[in-house]
Image: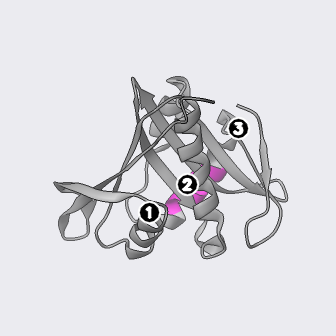
Amino acid sequence: MSAIRAEPAAGPVALRPMRDSDLDAVMAIEQRAYPFPWTRGIFRDCLKAGYPAWVLTEHQLVIGYGILSVAADEAHILNVCVSPERQGRGHGRYLLRALVNSARDLRAGRVFLEVRPSNLGAICLYHSEGFNEIGRRPRYYPARDGREDALVMAIELFFDEMA
């Protein structure tokens, strides 16, 4: 995986593979962004398993990240997050597109993700990028008052067989 340069609405950013040395910055964002964050061990296990994992940097500071799992012809976005201070500037859309493009490059035919029904901003982003709701996982996420369902969303990837 090589670094990708781009310029979302907020200015120059770079996307590069996540490394173990990024985990402090990733964990700081994860803990600010979610009431029930992933653990460092989960991120470390994803890296050890060789999952495509990316960090989005701005002026060499980590401002977001995404992790993808690919098996056979399906991909699953496991985590995608932008620092709360940097949200609303096109970074999440850029990171989501990079993950979908990684899945396409790895010949996945479909990409799945789960999202909390209460995360309306993320749901709007996913719909605007072509994801559709295909199901629901009851009581999937921990929540303050027990558990919250997950909406399961997917996008079909199409390939130009002539290319």
Q: Name which quarter of the figure residue 34 lies in.
A: bottom left
Image colouring: one colour
User: Which quadrant: the C terminus?
Assistant: top right
Task: Please say if the residues under marks 3 and 2 sit with CB atoms less than 8 Å apart.
Answer: no
What secondary structure is marked by label 1?
A: helix
Q: Label 3 vs label 2: CA separation?
A: 22 Å
Name the spot of residue 28 as percent of width and height, x first.
Answer: 59, 57
What secondary structure is marked by label 2?
A: helix
Which residue is disc 3 drawn over? 21
Which residue is disc 2 drawn over? 96
Q: Earlier in the sequence, mark 3 or mark 2?
A: 3
Task: Please say if the residues under marks 1 and 2 sit with CB atoms less than 8 Å apart.
Answer: yes
Q: Disc 2 residue type?
A: Leu
Q: Is residue 132 left or right of residue 85?
A: left
- Tell me the tag on residue 126: 1
Residue 49 magenta-highlighted: no
